[in-house]
Image (cartoon, helix red, strand yellow):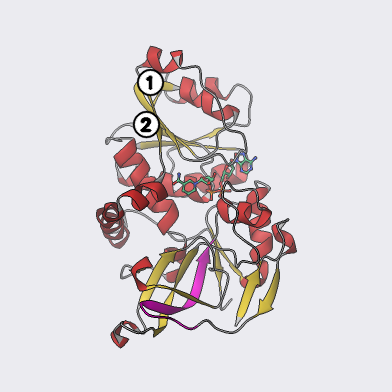
């Protein structure tokens, strides 16, 4: 089988395709014929070796997997063979086949393509957990999504719209703002402009926003916090900007505002059952056409390194997905 293997920490564009023997499922495990692999910023950091946790070398990058069960290990029913499944694992997605514990696999909802499923679990579960559980977003409220044309940002636009909110998408280029608008944002904002707060004030008639969805960090975070309406909630989702911001706490007091950490992975590790109602709701919304998790673009396995590189260089738009048969 073909795999992309990281043998040294470094730039993702240096990654090469190799061949390897297909793995064999052990007790309680399934062999998945991978059809699609979703990629995110964190996968690129793993390759550089600069994420907070380092994966031991060598490893196969890619953490979002969608495919069909091809074989099962001891203790599992053969009826599972042929099922469409999606799964998260810290590594292993950029391979034609992967072995995982059956307990880590979820069925792909009917009507959802495997490409959509590969880009769905991390970004959409984080968006719903963040906006609903952490942000208590209500219909009619206004959400400012930073890094809105990234994989995580696009999912937040889609989920916030499904929850009945008004969405302002902040992105740094015309192309990214157009993509965010096409994905459902009501308004767009160029937050690479130094006085972007004034532009936001004009969009919301100085009323402020109710929720900030922030996967970016850096200097953007404090400005966004200052844009909150009284009682607003600032959701800390990630630091794609590379800089972890500090915040003067008097701002929280003056605005009666909350700063809420969103760690969906941490939540399901602490409380594995929390994910079941979340995934059920998202599957229903997808089936009803309320959310639209199709990836912006798909790429062949040969392009995986370049796709990861573009994420690091801020050049990626939407959720990139690798198709094994492309
Ligand atoms: N909390 C959780 O549970 C959770 C789950 C998944 C991911 N995350 C985090 O969410 C963040 C976004 O992930 P993603 O996969 O959506 O990444 P992505 O597709 O690359 O999007 C990140 C966006 O951040 C903006 N950005 C600003 N400064 C940047 C810089 N110096 N380099 C790169 N991007 C920059 C870019 O938009 P502009 O060019 O428009 O500024 C980019 O579109 C990551 O930090 C990831 O770790 C958190």
**Image mark for residue 142:** 2
Secondary structure under the numbered disc 2 in the rendered image: strand
Q: Residue at x 46, y 26 (%)?
A: 203
Up/down of 307 relative to 209, above or below: below
The answer to whether residue 266 shows anywhere in this view is: yes
Label located before the other in sequence (2 or 1): 2
Up/down of 278 relative to 185, above or below: below
Asked whether 35 falls inside the magenta stretch, the response is yes
The answer to whether residue 315 shows anywhere in this view is: no
Camera-nearest residue between 297 and 272: 272
Decide if ligand 1 comes within 8 Å of the CB at mark 1. Answer: no
Asked whether 65 falls inside the magenta stretch, the response is no
Question: In the picture, residue 7 is in which quadrant?
Answer: bottom right
Marks 2, 1: nearer the viewer: 1
Q: CA distance from mark 2 to mark 1?
A: 10 Å
Q: Quadrant of the C terminus?
A: bottom right
Q: Position of residue 55 (x, y in %)?
A: 59, 58
Q: Which residues are magenta?
A: 24-38
Decide if ligand 1 comes within 8 Å of the CB at mark 2. Answer: no
Question: In the picture, residue 76 is in which quadrant?
Answer: bottom left
Q: Is residue 219 left or right of residue 289?
A: right
Q: Residue at x 35, y 79 (%)?
A: 83
The quadrant where ligand 1 appears is top right
């Amino acid at each position: 089988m073909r795999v992309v293997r990281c043998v040294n920490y470094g730039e993702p564009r240096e990654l090469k395709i190799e061949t390897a023997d297909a793995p064999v499922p052990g007790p309680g495990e399934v062999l998945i014929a991978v059809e699609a692999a979703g990629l995110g910023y964190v996968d690129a950091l793993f390759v550089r070796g600069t994420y907070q946790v380092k994966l031991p070398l060598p490893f196969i990058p890619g953490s979002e997997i969608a495919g069909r069960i091809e074989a099962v290990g001891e203790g599992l029913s053969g009826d599972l063979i042929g099922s469409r499944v999606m799964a998260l694992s810290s590594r292993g997605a950029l391979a034609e086949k992967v072995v995982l514990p059956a307990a880590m696999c979820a069925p792909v909802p009917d009507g959802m393509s495997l490409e959509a499923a590969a880009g769905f679990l991390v970004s959409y579960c984080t968006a719903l957990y963040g906006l609903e559980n952490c942000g208590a977003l209500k219909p009619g409220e206004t959400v400012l999504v930073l890094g809105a044309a990234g994989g995580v940002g696009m999912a937040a636009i889609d989920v916030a719209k499904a929850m009945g909110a008004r969405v302002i998408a902040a992105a740094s280029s015309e192309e990214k703002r157009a993509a965010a608008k096409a994905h459902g944002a009501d308004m767009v904002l160029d937050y690479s402009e130094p006085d972007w707060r004034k532009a936001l004030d004009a969009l919301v008639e100085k009323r402020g926003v109710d929720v900030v969805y922030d996967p970016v960090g850096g200097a953007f975070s404090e400005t966004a916090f200052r844009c909150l309406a009284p009682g607003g909630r600032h959701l800390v989702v990630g630091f794609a900007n590379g800089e972890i911001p500090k915040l003067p706490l008097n701002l929280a007091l003056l605005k009666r505002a909350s700063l809420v950490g969103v760690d969906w992975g941490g939540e399901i590790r602490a409380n594995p059952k929390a994910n079941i109602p979340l995934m059920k709701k998202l599957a229903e919304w997808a089936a009803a056409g309320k959310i639209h998790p199709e990836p912006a673009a798909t790429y062949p396995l040969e392009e995986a390194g370049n796709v990861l590189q573009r994420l690091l260089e801020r050049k990626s738009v939407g959720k990139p997905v690798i198709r094994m048969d492309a």
